Amino acid sequence: MNKGEIIKEIPEDVVVEVPVIVDKNGIHPEKIDPPLSKRVVKFYLYPRMMRMEMALEAFLTGDRKELEEVLVRDPRTKSFEQVQAVIDEILNLPFNEEMKRHYNR
């Protein structure tokens, strides 16, 4: 968690990945200096945080439409048909029966 505002430009309740020092006393995030630019925060971090929120919502509700929305907003996605095919392929794997039930309520 971004507790103590490890990255000052984003909220404390967001999980962050930053360099750390690990010793017998615990995990100590390194200071981010210089701070991230507003451009990086606005155009790189915020869109990812929004997709994370959408993915969490999809998981919590089991709403396949919400899951599709997450994937269609990904810049690597080529089409809505691709999104549907990927979800179907993943959900139809034999070891994903529980996930399939979760998203096909």
Image: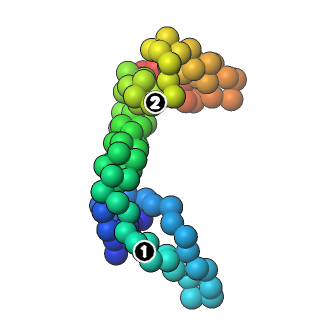
Q: Nearer the viewer, residue 62 or 51?
A: 51
Q: Is residue 67 visible?
A: no
Return the residue found at the far bottom.
Answer: 25
Picture quadrant where residue 4 is located: bottom left
Residue 16 screen position, x and y as percent: 45, 61
Assess disc 1: are there few (<14), some (14-19) or many (≥20) residues with their C-alpha within 10 Å of its C-alpha: few
Query: Relative to 103, does residue 41 appear above or below in the rendering?
Result: below
The mark nearer the N terminus, 2 or 1, is 1
Disc on res. 98: none
Q: Residue at x 30, y 57 (%)?
A: 38
Q: Residue at x 40, y 72 (%)?
A: 34
Query: Relative to 38, does residue 4 appear above or below in the rendering?
Result: below
- Cα–Cα gap, marks 2 and 1: 29 Å
Image quarter where the N terminus lies is bottom left
Q: Secondary structure at mark 1?
A: loop
Colour setup of the view:
rainbow
Q: Is residue 104 left or right of residue 99?
A: left
Return the residue found at the far top.
Answer: 81
Image quarter where the C terminus lies is top left
Identity of the amino acid at label 2? Pro
Residue 13 screen position, x and y as percent: 33, 61
Q: Nearer the viewer, mark 2 or mark 1?
A: 1
For label 1, the residue is 33
Q: Residue at x 46, y 30 (%)?
A: 75
Identity of the amino acid at label 1? Asp
Q: Secondary structure at mark 2?
A: loop
Q: Nearer the viewer, residue 90 or 97?
A: 90
Q: Residue at x 42, y 74 (%)?
A: 33
Residue 66 screen position, x and y as percent: 37, 27
Q: Nearer the viewer, residue 24 or 93?
A: 24
For label 2, the residue is 75
Q: Are marks 2 and 1 in contact (CB under 8 Å)?
A: no
